[in-house]
Image (cartoon, helix red, strand yellow):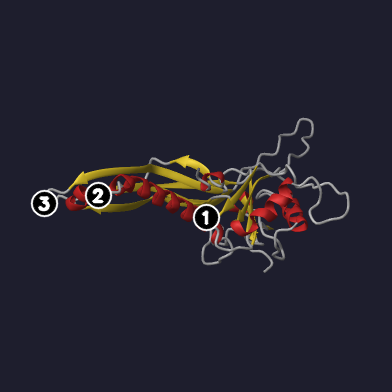
């Protein structure tokens, strides 16, 4: 079962590249006096993100002699090996967006990293989708992060209703996350306090493809946060070379990935240590 599909808004592409244009909402409605016209305003153009589809490929060759002498059914396993490698490629590329979430060398359409304390908004203010002080995964830090994303605003600085969808952690935080999300009472406390984070998330994603053992992320229900465009699904073909009599296997896939509204689609921290 793929993990990356739980993080991304999955879309189908039919072009060499796709462009997603953000548009701001409208301000609050004003009072309309009797007999007076209503106030008409236009939305502003937001940031534009471009997704260029890339082809990924991997092949393997079997000589005729290997085919004739194969005693261990290795050749029949080659398509399975290729399929597994392509799935690992998808996972690695997908989770690399989170691995680079705090790296200022990898920026989105708004010019800053995916998780940043100062995402510039079209209306002029900024939005933070990162803890002001990075912290390890604890009851307090998880509650603080959740509270912060509940206060997200749109580009007109109006409150929007954002909810956490899934918690994403590296394997090192697997059991810590499960205790926080599944315990009836506050973890590590002698008080009889209810665990407010239980049932808050639809899913927990424990990923071996996250490289930082301290970083953790929350994927929200905002559409088009992390986006994945599938141009051509993975396929495996085989053919023979006439002159060498080699049997060749090849798998290819074409897709692109990134983030359009990453500022609201992802909340993250690099951890406290």
Q: Sequence order check: which comes first, mark 2 or mark 1?
A: 2
Q: Nearer the viewer, mark 2 or mark 3?
A: 2
Return the mark for residue 95. 1
Residue pointed to by mark 3: 243
Disc number lying in front (2 or 1): 2
Whichever of callouts 2 and 3 sits on the residue coming sooner in the sequence is 2
Q: Is residue 152 visible?
A: no
Q: Earlier in the sequence, mark 1 or mark 3?
A: 1
Callout 2 secondary element: loop
Helix, strand, or loop for circle 1? helix
**Label number found at residue 82:** none
Q: Please tell me which residue lies in front, 160 or 6.
A: 6
**Marks 1 and 3, Cα distance to the nearest angstrom?**
42 Å
Residue under numbered circle 2: 70
Looking at this view, name the residue that lies furthest to the left.
Answer: 243
Query: Viewed as shown, does residue 3 lie left or right of 269?
Result: left
Measured as percent of width and height from the top left, residue 171 is found at 59, 56
Binning the other alpha carbons within 10 Å of mark 3 as few (below 14), some (14 to 19) or many (20 upward) gives: few
Depth check, front residue: 19 or 212: 212
Q: Are marks 2 and 1 in contact (CB under 8 Å)?
A: no
| Quadrant that contains the C terminus | bottom right
Measuring 37% from the left and 49% from the top, which residue is drawn there?
Answer: 81
Q: Position of residue 96 (x, y in %)?
A: 51, 58
Name the side, left or right, on which 250 lies relative to 89: left
For residue 13, side relative to residue 6 (left or right): left
In this view of the protein, can residue 168 be seen by the observer?
yes
* Callout 2–callout 3 Cβ contact below 8 Å: no
Measure how far apart labels 2 and 1 are at the Cα level: 37 Å
Q: CA distance from mark 2 to mark 3?
A: 21 Å
Residue 190 horizontal side relative to residue 180, left or right: right
Q: Quadrant of residue 173?
A: bottom right
């Amino acid at each position: 079962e793929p993990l990356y599909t739980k993080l991304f808004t999955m879309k189908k592409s039919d072009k060499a590249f796709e462009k997603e244009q953000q548009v701001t909402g409208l301000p609050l409605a004003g009072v309309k006096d009797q007999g007076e016209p209503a106030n008409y305003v236009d939305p502003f153009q937001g940031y534009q993100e471009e997704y260029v589809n890339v082809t990924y490929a991997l092949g393997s060759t079997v000589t005729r002699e290997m085919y004739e002498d194969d005693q261990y059914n290795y050749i029949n396993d080659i398509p399975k090996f290729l399929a597994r490698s392509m799935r690992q490629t998808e996972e690695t590329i997908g989770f690399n967006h989170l691995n680079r979430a705090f790296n200022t060398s990898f920026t989105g359409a708004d010019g800053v990293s995916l998780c940043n304390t100062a995402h510039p908004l079209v209306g002029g203010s900024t939005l933070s989708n990162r803890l002001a002080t990075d912290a390890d995964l604890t009851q307090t830090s998880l509650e603080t992060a959740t509270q912060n994303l509940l206060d997200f605003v749109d580009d007109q600085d109006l409150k929007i209703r954002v909810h956490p969808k899934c918690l994403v952690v590296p394997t090192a935080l697997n059991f810590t996350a499960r205790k926080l999300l599944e315990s009836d009472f506050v973890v590590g406390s002698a008080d009889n306090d209810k665990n407010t984070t239980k049932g808050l998330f639809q899913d927990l994603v424990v990923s071996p493809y996250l490289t930082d053992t301290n970083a953790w992320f929350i994927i929200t229900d905002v559409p088009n946060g992390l986006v994945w465009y599938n141009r051509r699904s993975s396929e495996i073909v085989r053919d023979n070379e006439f002159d060498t009599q080699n049997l060749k296997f090849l798998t290819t896939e074409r897709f692109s990935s990134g983030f359009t509204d990453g500022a609201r689609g992802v909340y993250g921290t690099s951890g406290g240590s």
